[in-house]
Amino acid sequence: MRTFKILSVQTIKSHKYLLILGLVSLYIYAGFLLYSTLFKLKDAGNALQLSSFLIQSGMLFFMFLGFRLARKNSGAMALYKTIKGSIIKVLLLNIVLLLLIITIFVFSLIVITTLYYFHLNPSNHFYFESGAFLINNLLLPYFITGLIGYIVGVNSRSTFSYAYLILIWALLSPTNQYFVNNLLSNTQLTEGFSLLHNLNLGVQDMNVPYQPFYGFQLYWAKKVIYILILLGICILSIFTAIKQRLQRINIASVLFTLVSFSLIPYSSNNINYLDGYLDEYDFYEKRHKIPYKDLFDYKIENIKVVVKNYEKFSVDLEMEVNNIKTSKIAFTLYKGFHITEINDSNGINLLFEQTGDYTIVNLPLNYKERTMTLNVKYTGNGTLANPATQNKVFLPSDFGWIPTNKMTPTHFVFNEHVIPNKLSNPEPIKFKLTYEGKDKLDYVNLKQRSSSVYEGEATGLTLISGDLTQRKKDDHNIYYPKSWFSYEFELDKYLVEFEKIISNYNNLFKTNYKLPKNIVLLPSMAINDSYIFTFTSGTKEQLIIQLDPVELTKKRPLNTTIPYQMEFAFNNNKNFDGPEQFANWLVFNSFLGANLDNDFEDKSSFIFKQYQQLVAEPYISEKDKPIYNQLLKYNNTKLPNEFLIKWKLLLEDDEENDWEQLQKLLKTTQMGAIQ
């Protein structure tokens, strides 16, 4: 211990200027990053996610620190005489000192961020994720580059060592890979992309902001194994410090490990939803044949669902079907879920045909006009907006992941966006869920009977598993991402305003909606949040809202969209056959929201109203444009409540001539402006 103290003091004195300059620079940059994103914007997630330059600069500094420690101490024979220790002991203690300096630096950042998190919100649970991120993306990469620098310093006296280290640093650091990738794309060497990605020690994609629902994607095994291998090379280098031939082998072994690790991908269960999104767009942009209406004319009573979410998201479902009137039935299930088997209660396999979102099942003749139980087995990964993987699950009750007898597609394309339809059952049915998976579910809209069994009545089944936390507020259970702990006040204020607008909605349509017991607040899950207000989903037991309170990424004040969310929140049985019907509802929604808004003259609210009209206009036929233009004359006023009530009724009826009916309504209603 005394030897280590003497060596530490002597080493720090010998490298004091390097240590002061390097560590102070890193602290200054870390402080600037935390101030600009965490202190000013209260964005705990992106304060870390966007730290690639801190990771990269630290990797370079500790690589050269390791190199200088090895180079200077290995030549300082007077030091060895002073402490009366062997060269092997000194070099080993140098490694310990290097790793200790790195550890102190990273853990000081962990302490600083944790204290500030508790200053913002003492009840936060984000400190664990933050600490894990800093250890995974700073401590381990700094260990790796520091050890590489040390190995090169021990084994090489060449002036080319610096160039060698710079090359390795460029291959391992996250931001340099961005520029190297551009270089490779210009030379058409696209195969190098995956190799560089496999070498990256920092944030996997520096251009992607933090996604609060998914949390940080951390990879431990590969980095830890690499550190152990480098420690082995370090020890081998120490014992062969005076053998030149073996020194060359030690340096070459570093390159060999780099090449080997470039061939090994990071273990990741993430699904590439982007390619799937493009396929979805191509599919739902076209009109597809719908099975005969009679095939959907039956009733679903009870549903038992067994979900096993490990390598695959697998569903084994039993549903009780009655009032069967044909020898075949059809149901709607999102096309991304591949049905592997359908059989009856006796285990007899039934013939079926799955085409897109629709599946037709051939029934035995003796089941006609009787009740039967169908067993349906299927697997899938969900979609970009509704993932179903072993890491994260977001399957709301109105998403088409459970078979339903509604004959509308699960999605449609509107203004180059894939929009999910709402496929909730009109009446509650009995559900029983048994769930097994890598992670526990954060929220299920059924009562929990045991650790894995849930039961209850609902209009659909909701499964949510993400990087979420939960707290109680009055009589409500509020679920939201852990990284939003600094926005609790804003979220509470948002829900208070939401409740006021619900009251306005109830007064207008004579309904009795209210905030349910369970409220789930999530970030935008789609590729684009332009239609985030339409993804609000409400039932008696739950309210799921997608919003963005984060200052860095949000496009408008939180309260702006609330009046325009009501119709979609409490109209879950409304599905759209195509973009034209959706456009009609957007026009209606733009005027409805203006009436519900307590601050009608708010500029951001008015802009959002106009935005809905702007995106809907291309889907309005030339024949109906005069009626639409007549409506726009009332854009600066509130419409009569009577007019809105009748307008909604005509949109909900089975007639397709919505604009003709609206024209008659305009003629028969006194359209005096309400200020």
Image (cartoon, grey):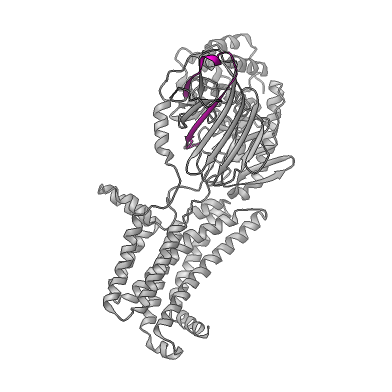
Picture coordinates of residue 264 (x, y %)?
A: 36, 54
Residue found at x 46% / y 18%: 290
Visible residue check, residue 635: no
Give the farthest residue toward the right.
Answer: 474
Vertical relation: 276 (above or below) 354: below
Q: Quadrant of residue 605?
A: top right
Q: How many marks are shown on the rendered structure?
A: 0
Q: Quadrant of residue 118?
A: bottom right
202 relative position to 456: left or right:
left
Picture coordinates of residue 495 (x, y %)?
A: 67, 38
Does the magenta run of residues contain 317?
A: no
Residue found at x 47% / y 44%: 311
Residues 27 and 223: in front is 223
Q: Quadrant of residue 306?
A: top right
Visible residue check, residue 432: yes
Does the magenta run of residues contain 386?
A: yes
Picture coordinates of residue 20 (x, y %)?
A: 47, 73
Vertical relation: 71 (above or below) 659: below
533 relative position to 179: left or right:
right
Residues 535 and 19: in front is 535
Residues 388 and 576: in front is 388
Picture coordinates of residue 585 (x, y %)?
A: 55, 22
Residues 198 and 126: in front is 198
Q: Please report the bounds of the magenta region as a residue range.
A: 358-387
Image quarter in which the C terminus is found: top right
